[in-house]
Amino acid sequence: MANENADPRIISMLDQETESFNQTADAFEAQYGFRHNCKCAQDYTDGNVGEVTECFMGLVDDALRACEQMKTELETYRGLAAIALNQRDATENLPETTEDQ
C-alpha cells in the first residue's frame, strides 16, 4: 500500500541514505557480523512506517554495540585457537631427538 502522504523530499533523502548505506553493507557486516539490506526508502514509500520510542532506539544501539564487541571477541578467540593449533601441529612434526627415543 503506497503512502499517499509521502513527502517527496523525504523520499529523496531516504533514497540517498539507503543507497549510501547499501554501498557500505560490507563494512557494516564486517563491523557487526551480519548483513543488512537497507530498504528504508521503499518502506517509507510503501507506507510501512511507524513510530518508535527513544528507549527502543537505545536498545537497538546497545544491541549493535554488543554485536560489534562479541564479533571482535570471537575473532580474537579464533585467532588464538588457530595459533594454538598451529603450534601444536608444528611440535608434532618435529624430528625425534635422542631424548624421545
Image (spheres, grey):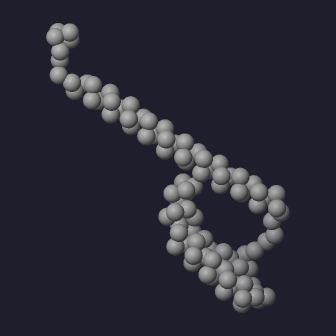
Viewer-closest of 38 and 79: 79
1 versus 100 height, above or below: below
Q: Is residue 46 visible?
A: no
Locate the C terminus by quadrant.
top left
16 versus 99 height, above or below: below
40 versus 74 height, above or below: below
Q: Residue furthest front?
A: 98
Q: Residue at x 63, y 82 (%)?
A: 15
Q: Residue at x 20, y 9 (%)?
A: 99
Locate the N terminus by quadrant.
bottom right
Viewer-closest of 42 and 80: 80
Viewer-closest of 27 and 56: 27
Q: Quadrant of residue 17?
A: bottom right
Query: x, y percentage for residue 40?
Result: 66, 75
Q: Residue at x 75, y 88 (%)?
A: 7
- Left or right: 49 in relation to 72: right
Q: Is residue 6 visible?
A: yes
Q: What is the tally of numbered marks visible in this picture?
A: 0
Q: Residue at x 66, y 80 (%)?
A: 14
Query: x, y percentage for residue 95?
Result: 17, 22
76 versus 65 height, above or below: above
Query: x, y percentage for residue 61?
Result: 71, 57
Query: x, y percentage for residue 74?
Result: 52, 42
- Left or right: 9 in relation to 88: right
